Amino acid sequence: MKIQTIAKFVDQPVILNKLHKSMPALLVGTGVGYGIYDTVKHKKHDKKRGFKNTIIIGTTIAATLLGTRGLRINGRKIFNGLMETEPLSDILARQSKAVDKYLKQETIQDNSLLSVLTKPKTTHLSLKDIALLSAKLPHNQARKDLFGVILPDVKEDVHTFAEIKRLSALGAVPVIGGVIGGIAADKITGTSSRNKTANKIKEGFYQYFANICLCNVGAALAMFGAEKLQKYKIIKPLTPAQKLVTILGGITATGIVGGSYIANYMSKKLINPLFHQKSNKNLYSERKPETLDIALHTDDIATAGILSGFKWIEPALPLMYFISGYRAGIGYRNGEHKHDTHDNRQKTSYKVNING
């Protein structure tokens, strides 16, 4: 099976529509499953963990769904989402029209081909169907027009900066939702403190700037540089695969390498003074990168894929951003923090609890 055939299969409009529709259920299922696991794991020493998780996970998921799908009340659109999808009925109607147009222009005698050509009117094509059409349909303008609707190629006209803006906003929504949910959970359970609130905001900074925003900035800078080189004919126009490599290079240089440094620096200079917290000289004393942070950068690969024109990756982004929102909600800290007590002014070193 050719890679090109697989790429065409996953990029079918009907497949994309199904992936987008499955995202809310997958997001809710993952959130509920993790909430139960985490609650059971910590139930012995944290009786309020389950209630807090319910609030944090609930607000993070709600914010994510509102951000991606928008809000409609009584049929009236209140605001648009950042990942809205076209109704399946509209997609099938457009495909049906394209198929009918093709069959009027071309005379197809092969019954197997005719059978496959009717499928886009009601559903998606299988890998075998795509291979058959690619091999047997005549190479002409009629075929090109048909494939442009039912088997569209990877988009090469992605507007990089508009997409960067959209994806950065998409990543901010669950993080903000998580922080709000975490602060609300502490207030409701009577466990709120200035230190916990500060930790949630700082982790929100860390997740957004280290794992989302600055990686997008790196991608934008890489593409901007590549476009300038193309403009002056220093390099040839990039293929989607070359775009992917270029964007990943920008993400690595700006986001993964510098993101945690900038996020911790901002927390030290902005958040700590605001909440009257003392800053340790070591920039990574409260929050240092760890394995999961590196794993979270898989969303950057997804971002790079979207900017390169591979739209089938997009439905996975909300699930990846949800993890960042949850960590912000619990005010995750994993470093050593020096604290001066007002009673004896002795410095003690302790591990900061992941609940903030």
Image: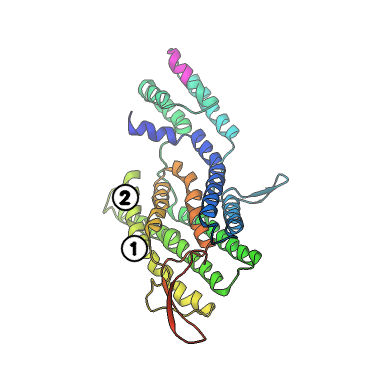
Q: Note whether 38 is above or below 6 in the view shown.
A: below
> Which mark lies nearer to you, 2 or 1?
1
Q: Position of residue 145 (x, y in %)?
A: 45, 30
Which residue type does callout 1 highlight?
Answer: Val
Residue 126 screen position, x and y as percent? 44, 26
Residue at image coords 49%, 69%: 202
Residue found at the far left of this picture: 234
Looking at the picture, how far across and down is residue 222, in whole percent?
Answer: 35, 57
Q: Tag 2: Cα neighbours inside 10 Å, few (<14), some, or many (≥20)?
A: some
The residues colored magenta run: 110-116
Which label was assigned to residue 245? 2
Q: Nearer the viewer, residue 222 or 347?
A: 347
What is the three-letter code of the residue carrying label 2? Val
Is there CB contact under 8 Å for labels 2 and 1?
A: no
Residue 296 visible? The answer is yes
Looking at the rendered structure, which numbered label has been put on residue 257?
1
> Which badge, 2 or 1, comes first in the chain's sequence?
2
In this image, 101 relative to 55: left or right? left
Q: Is residue 327 left or right of residue 249?
A: right
Check the image and report above or below for 245 versus 275. above
- Relative to the observer, which residue lies in front, 127 or 207? 207
Give me the residue at 42% from left, 68% from top.
287
User: At numbered mark 1, what does the secondary structure look like: helix, strand or loop?
Assistant: loop
Q: Is residue 239 visible?
A: no
State yes or no: residue 113 in magenta.
Answer: yes
Is residue 326 shown above or below 93?
A: below
Q: CA distance from mark 2 to mark 1?
A: 17 Å
